[in-house]
Amino acid sequence: MNLYIEAIGFGVIAASSIALGAMGFTLQFGLTNVLNVGYGATMSFGAIVAYAAHLTGMSIWLALICGGIATSGLTLLSAKTLLRVYAKRGAALFEMAMVTFGIALIVEYAIASITENNTFSLTIAIEHTHALGPIRFTDVQLALVILAVVVFILLDGFLRLTKVGTALRATAVDPDLARASGIATGRIVTIAWLLSGFLCGLAGGVFTIDILTVNAFTGDSLLSLVIVAALMGTAGSVRGAALAALLLGIATQLVSAAGASGYASAVAYGVLAVVLLARPKSVQGGLVADRVQITV
Amino acid sequence: MLRPEPCLRAAEVSFGYASLRVVHEASLQVGPGETVVLLGPNGAGKSTLVKGIIGQLPLLSGTLDLNGSDISRTPAQIRVRQGLGYVPQIRDVFPTLSVWENLTMGGYLLARSGIKERAEQVIGDFPALDRLRRRRAGTLSGGERKMLAIARALMAKPSVLILDEPTSNLAPLIAAKVLEEIVASLAGAGQAVLMIEQRVELALQVATYGYVLVQGQMRLDGHAAQLQETEDLSSLFFSGGAAPLHGGPEAATRGLA
Amino acid sequence: MSAFVSISLVYLAIYTLSAWSLNLQYGYAGIINFGWIVFQSIGAYVAATTALGSPTSGGFQTYIFGARLGFPLPLIMGTLAGAALALLLGLIILTRRIRPDFQAIIMLVVAIIAAEVVSTNTALFNGANGLSNVPQPFNGVMHLSYNNYQWFFVAFSFALCIIVYFGLEWICRSSWGRALRAMREDDILASHVGINVQALRIVVFVIGGAIAGFSGALLVEFLGTWSPDAWSFVESFVVFVSVYVGGRANNRGAIIGAFLVPVVFGTMPSFLPEFGYPGLSANLEWLVIAALWLTTFYLRPAGILPEGRFIARRTRAREQAPVMPPIAKQGSVA
């Protein structure tokens, strides 16, 4: 029994990186409608930058922020150059996803080429462990969970209580009407890419601190869970993404605890397939019916 | 009857899509306190004209001024800042945002400190919205939703408010209410209103002035009372513009006949 | 040198079949099968297990339904397996109206789950180690040298390609092919003119699945081995890129795409002398394929051999460009 309670604890820790990633993903996807399959690669980028920054002697927490900022820059750069070019040429939804896939391959294999396919391991001194019933948290793990919660509260508050945050939600629902209300939608989209990139880099870094290794493909192992959480929580909903991430984190750890670790993520993907098939309202549109606007 | 000095003036404007010109050298004007209705059969180009005025389509020829300054080349969001308010036919509110949030978005261009005050003012003008503040706009009834859409557009204190078929999705009774209560009261408050409307009879009762667009050209215009008496208004609608023209004074000066 | 040419040619044949399969599903019918590789893979596994014979107890590999069928039965079984999987998934996924990019995700998810289940569960197809020692057709009978057998396989696979090509052209040029394009352009309109869109979508998905299964069966007969490493979901991307580079809804274009993308940039570099650290050339291959995709999609979005001009603009035009309101159309008559 304790095994399962422990698994819940691990699930919460695992959820911290999934949630950070999913919040960034859903924010950008809900606003721009670009299905960013390249998100995994940019998470790897954030993780690698954070690791490199940590190597220079920076504290791991500061390094994490560095990773976030660098990824934010990379994301905005690729959105405003490559993605924008293809969106202007009228690329369809799926073609935009293919473009992000191409960008992802370039980012990943560029990192792989530079790092010579190495996997680096991270060592962080653990000072204390805390016990919560049978669940044991180290200082670092506790910090990761707190970080994710704080980011969630800040982001949710930003979206609900500030003018720019509300404008971001408004633009996500109806960019034309937002423009007709005088909202500078271009600026709002830029803010969304920056925020999403920052959260993406943070997620990559947090995932690395959690599993203590990093290579060019680190982000990929997190990507599918991030997309699952973002889509389960309805595209564009930060609260939904955070909740779905928590559920997924716990579910995958419970499946592992039950001895079927090989199926842990298969369960998560199965959940996604069921969600997508059973909730046609959030995903419908057919090939033609609804025009979905891409705003990059 | 003299018309007030216009705040929005479109002179011989043409609009269209790519190589296709839909509106040909149409002119219209709207002044404070006027409710101007743009009539015309389906496919006449009314929506195209309005889209051009608010800046969603580029101006192909002619001039557009708002409050005396030329807005022909001004991007859509700047036209909003300069005083064009617009309520689309469908997708007129942000359905996932609350009523209050919709209003604050309408006042996006106001100074931060002024938004709340202005929203209270607007709710004062539309008391029915008061108890709905926290409701999601997507859950409102058709009439409430249109009221919110208009209130949202008024937040920015537009000098001209443009309504694209405000009653198109409403039941007849509600439609009459929207036109007779909401739209009519706007003119009473001195607001300049330009609206496209399919319900000709009802619209002419509320409006002060009307234009008839047929096949992309202004075929007729005149005071609402005059237009109401025009016998062949409906033949103009159905004949595709072949009927003889009984233009108002402005139509004559444009030399369309 | 001879081996280099013959192996590349066999790959060309197999990737051409792959591109045709996806081209039929995506290029002609607009179905975004981002999990395409699963259909090739099941064809390969089924062909392998039906050629390997029943697994002996204590043998080094375990798998289900082992049988030792002679040529051409494993190929046929592989083809049928691809078709059956397509029928099953088609009935679940294609019967719903889902946004096209979400449809792609579901297919992608299917591919990831399949890879994980097959890698983990050794009882199915020997898990992550995969199957090996799959007998090659006629190799036991003909007693050819290694090189000659390779060339025999080139001729064999080309002959099969020619048959498939004529079959596909026949399908795509028939009234049935026109119905496919009509459905891709506007499924609602197509259903209004009496096309049974759902049935058509599933049938075309099944035919595409059958060709994918067939290509997998042929591939495993040639390689003799098949494991989860060979069919990561990224492979579907490569096939999509070849369809795009060659030109959607153009079967001759697909040959060019298959030649350029997976053969020239994906397979041939492995014959180059190794340079740098191990794995560098593989990294560079991927960089080149990604760059090739981004540049061709920019420079020639319709591909090298675009679809014939008699067909209206593609789906994207409608999905993105402002839809011309009826107003405008009437205005233009005036």
Image (cartoon, coloured by chain):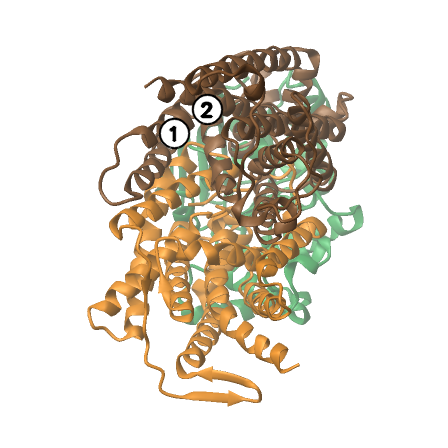
Chain colours: A orange, B green, C brown
Q: Is residue B56 at least partly visible in the picture? A: no
Element assignment for label 1:
helix
Residue closer to the observer: C302 or B131: C302
Asked if residue A227 is positioned above or below residue C53 in the image, the reply reads below
Return the x and y of residue C109 as percentages of the image width and height. Answer: 59, 48
The residue carrying pointer 2 sits among few (fewer than 14), some (14 to 19) or many (20 or more) residues within 10 Å by Cα, namely many
The residue carrying pointer 1 sits among few (fewer than 14), some (14 to 19) or many (20 or more) residues within 10 Å by Cα, namely some
Q: Is residue C312 at least partly visible in the picture? A: yes
Residue closer to the observer: C144 or A101: C144
Element assignment for label 2:
helix
- Are labels 1 and 2 on one chain? yes
Asked if residue B210 is positioned above or below residue B60 in the image, the reply reads below
Asked if residue A69 is positioned above or below residue A134 in the image, the reply reads above
Cβ–Cβ below 8 Å for labels 1 and 2?
A: yes
Report the chain holding disc 2.
C
Q: Amino acid at mark 1?
A: Thr
Return the x and y of residue B20 as percentages of the image width and height. Answer: 49, 21
- Of labels 1 and 2, earlier in sequence is 2
Left or right? Give the position of B111 relative to C86.
left
Q: Amino acid at mark 2?
A: Tyr
In the rendered structure, find residue C11 and report the number of the disc placed on it. 2
Q: Which residue is mark 1?
A: C267
Kindly give the residue lying farthest to the left in the view shown.
A56
Residue closer to the observer: C107 or B235: C107
